[in-house]
């Protein structure tokens, strides 16, 4: 099952490939618009332009890999100039060789280069970094993975828009482990890149219980057969190949000795669309199954622009683009091209400020005196003070039918940027903060009682984590009964007992029954499973927020999966309540975007029988049926089966994510429901595994429940009070625009240090908007297999 944004957080998306013309040329405007501002070196001398020198592999062992990187630089230069930025580009060839690169750097400096983009290889950058350090020339690399740059003394003017090999190693290890590797031969070039990644990869494999052996080789090794013999002699069943183009004959030898593509994961230095062509041009499938990885661009439009230039995907191109944009923005922010002043402002351009996504947008904010947080073509950056990005988006690529395809995207988040306060400081901060009393209103009974275990357990795990970190939180509990009247009575009791905030209810209609009371008493409410889109606009939702996405997100995920399964017409059987009708409305809209026709059949959940509902669905002639129901959904599905509707044609909304559903539909023969699909909001794999220790496979809304409690606690710390107006004002801000953190302890430490935070939870990035809606939804898609509901995919949307 693909993994989404866990604590090495992963975001899945399939990226479609496009055809491009590798002979296309980039057109850079010859006459740029006037500059947005006139940078000055502070001495009264106006710098007319920023001169950027690129030192990238036009030739050598990374020539093929370098093409999209060079294209990324060219595109960024064009965009900056088009937006009025005054920059000029000088190009030099690194040759993928430290000596050639150093000669190129010296030539570029003689020609007036004030900053350097490159090199692509860590070992090559190590060959030029001392010269740039002595000359006080800022340097940005889009692809150096060597962790040494993070600490070495001469990296004062160095930063990178790719994360170190500390992010690559877990991704490679997970890929090899997923293919049941038992012993991995790590064939690694002995340079800064290969040696560092091999050591890290060996450690990560060990954590997964996979043995490995490192087989090093010098980059100029002339006998690949010797390396292949060592791999065979090691008894390895899998290979991690950390190489540049010298890895091609090594790979060829592995295939000749019985290894298949599926047994190899190659490092980013081998990732090129041309790689399969180096084997048998008449049988490009020979390499099928081989995986590699590289940084990926954050949007399809940029991918297409790179394709039009070099005819291949933008691997590494987004990071190169970001190097140029950040150097250009730093030039504006510093008001000079002087190295010390320019490098000083770089980290601050990527954190704490207002989000912006292009040179034009960010430059305008800078001119207006606004601090910015640039998220670029390679995604969020979030630099440390030492110039390391703490967020990296990697694409896992697999050769299928003779061509690389991106099969998974993984966003890796490293530890917080700022120095954390001491344990004593944090303890004092938490002890001085207000105690938060949470009133829990969840369905211990009623037609949604099966979501009580995961939601209540998710909330409990959050409380445990808060208390373990020293936070002060108290819990009062009550049963909503999945009934508005019961819930109102419970909420009134909890408020009387001193609840500062309310967590719940599970059902949108139930929350609607007491939201007015909370509005009048100014009590903050967080829901983990209310998806009705009405909450986004109603006037009495001023104190309401949610960690689950609305039906506007839920519906496209369901519609997209129905389209992938070949559905062309859908009967939507919708419960006649706030949730059912809201989701049905959005389903009609989303299905229409896939050119799928639909008809809504409403029903009352209190009906004595649902035979007429199933019959109405059958009479529509639809090839797919969507059932938006709670516990009554079992009777509806049973009736649909009796009407001859195959289970593979039936899809259930989140209200039907009940592990007992197959047995309730068909007692004694649960496999009769095999093929039925059900959807629900979910946490990531790591949290789901933790949750499952308590509730088995019933994971529905557990991650969202956990995040409700954490956000409430963090907002209380940020506000310094449990007062409703002040607390709710802090809620969106703790999930966006600040420094990334992924746990209560880490986020609280940053708050104690006076740092704005951006909490990314176990249910993924939240990015709450001003009305309390999360703008990213994480959903599990599950199917009944062998009579058991099994998660087959976890997806983030959008």
Image: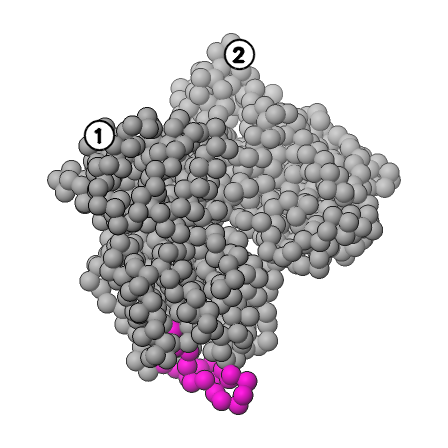
Q: Residue at x 40, y 26 (%)?
A: 182
Q: What's the distance in space between the residues labelled 2 and 1, CA to CA?
A: 53 Å
- Does the magenta portion include 251? no
Q: Main secondary structure of the magenta part?
A: loop
Mark 2 residue element: loop
Residue at mark 2: 667
Q: Where are the magenta residues, as a range?
A: 32-52
Residue 739 pos. (x, y %): 60, 56
Residue 473 pos. (x, y %): 78, 41
* In this view, 680 is above or below 658: below
- Camera sees residue 375: yes
- Determine which of the numbered discs, if any, sits on residue 257 in the image: 1
**Closest to the observer, 433 or 565:** 433
Q: Residue at x 74, y 48 (%)?
A: 423
**Closest to the observer, 214 or 14:** 214
Residue furthest left in the image: 282
The image quarter in which residue 405 lies:
top left
Task: Work out whether mark 2 precedes mark 1 in sequence or the reverse, and give the earlier one.
Answer: 1
Q: Is residue 752 left or right of residue 237?
A: right
The image quarter in which residue 654 lies:
top right
């Amino acid at each position: 099952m693909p993994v989404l944004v866990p604590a090495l957080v992963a975001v899945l998306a399939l990226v479609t490939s496009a055809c491009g013309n590798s002979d296309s040329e980039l057109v850079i405007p010859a006459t740029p618009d006037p500059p947005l501002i006139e940078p000055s070196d502070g001495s009264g001398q106006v710098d007319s332009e920023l001169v950027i020198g690129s030192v990238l592999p036009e030739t050598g062992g990374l020539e093929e890999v370098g093409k999209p990187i060079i294209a990324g630089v060219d595109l960024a230069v064009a965009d900056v100039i088009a937006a009025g930025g005054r920059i000029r580009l000088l190009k030099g060839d690194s040759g993928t060789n430290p000596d050639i690169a150093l000669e190129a750097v010296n030539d570029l400096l003689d020609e007036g280069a004030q900053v350097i983009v490159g090199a692509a290889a860590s070992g090559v950058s190590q060959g030029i970094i001392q010269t740039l350090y002595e000359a006080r020339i800022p340097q940005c690399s889009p692809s150096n993975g060597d962790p040494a740059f993070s600490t070495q003394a001469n990296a004062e003017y160095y930063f990178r828009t790719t994360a170190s090999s500390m992010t690559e190693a877990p991704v490679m290890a997970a890929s090899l482990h997923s293919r049941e590797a038992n012993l991995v031969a790590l064939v690694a070039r002995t340079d800064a890149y290969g040696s560092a990644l091999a050591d890290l990869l060996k450690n990560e494999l060990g954590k997964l219980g996979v043995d490995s052996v490192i087989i090093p080789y010098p980059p100029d090794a002339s006998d690949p057969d010797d390396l292949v013999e060592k791999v065979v002699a090691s008894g390895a069943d899998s290979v991690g190949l950390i190489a540049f183009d010298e890895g091609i004959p090594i790979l060829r030898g592995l295939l000749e000795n019985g290894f298949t593509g599926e047994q190899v994961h190659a490092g980013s230095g081998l990732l090129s669309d041309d790689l399969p062509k180096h084997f048998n041009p008449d049988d490009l499938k020979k390499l099928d199954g081989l995986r590699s990885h590289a940084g990926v661009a954050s949007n399809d439009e940029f991918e297409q622009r790179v394709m039009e230039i070099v005819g291949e995907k933008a691997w590494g191109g987004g990071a190169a683009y970001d190097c140029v944009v950040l150097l250009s923005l730093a030039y504006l922010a510093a008001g000079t091209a002087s190295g010390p002043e320019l490098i000083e402002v770089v980290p601050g351009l990527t954190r704490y400020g207002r989000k912006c996504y292009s040179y034009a947008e960010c430059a305008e904010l800078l001119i207006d005196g606004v601090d910015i947080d640039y998220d670029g073509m390679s995604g969020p950056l979030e630099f440390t003070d030492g110039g390391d990005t703490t967020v990296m988006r990697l694409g896992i690529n697999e050769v299928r039918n003779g061509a690389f395809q991106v099969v998974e995207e993984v966003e890796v988040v490293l530890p917080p940027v700022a120095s954390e306060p001491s344990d004593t400081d944090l303890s004092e901060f938490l002890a001085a903060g207000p105690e938060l009393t949470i009133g829990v209103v969840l369905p211990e009974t009623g037609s949604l009682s099966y979501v009580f275990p995961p939601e209540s357990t998710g909330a409990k795990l959050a409380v445990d984590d808060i208390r373990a970190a020293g936070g002060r939180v108290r819990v009062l509990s009550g049963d909503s009964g999945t009934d508005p009247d019961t819930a109102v009575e419970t909420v009134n009791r909890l408020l009387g007992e001193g609840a500062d905030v309310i967590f719940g209810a599970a059902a949108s209609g139930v929350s609607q029954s007491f939201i007015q009371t909370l509005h009048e008493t100014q009590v903050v409410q967080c829901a983990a499973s209310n998806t009705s889109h009405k909450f986004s606009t109603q006037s009495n939702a001023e104190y309401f927020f949610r960690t689950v996405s609305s039906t506007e997100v839920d519906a496209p995920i369901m519609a997209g999966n129905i389209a992938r399964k070949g559905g062309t017409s859908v009967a939507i059987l919708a419960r006649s309540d706030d949730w059912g009708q809201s989701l049905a409305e959005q389903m009609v809209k989303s299905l229409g975007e896939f050119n799928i026709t639909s008809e809504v059949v409403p029903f009352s959940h209190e009906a004595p029988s649902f035979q007429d509902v199933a019959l109405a669905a059958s009479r529509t002639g639809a090839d797919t049926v969507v059932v938006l129901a709670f516990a009554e959904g079992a009777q509806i599905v049973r009736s649909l089966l009796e009407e001859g509707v195959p289970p593979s044609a039936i899809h259930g909304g989140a209200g039907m994510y009940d592990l007992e559903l197959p047995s309730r539909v068909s007692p004694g023969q649960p496999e009769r429901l095999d093929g039925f699909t059900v959807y629900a909001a979910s946490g990531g794999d790591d949290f789901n595994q933790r949750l499952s220790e308590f509730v088995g496979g019933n994971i529905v809304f557990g991650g969202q429940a956990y995040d409700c409690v954490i956000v409430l606690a963090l907002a209380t710390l940020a506000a310094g009070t449990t007062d409703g107006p002040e607390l709710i004002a802090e809620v969106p801000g703790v999930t966006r625009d600040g420094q990334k953190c992924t746990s209560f302890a880490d986020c609280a430490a940053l708050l104690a240090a006076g740092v704005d935070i951006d909490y990314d939870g176990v249910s993924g990035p939240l990015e709450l908007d001003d009305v309390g809606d999360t703008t990213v939804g994480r959903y599990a898609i599950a199917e009944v297999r062998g009579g058991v509901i099994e998660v087959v995919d976890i997806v983030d949307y959008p």
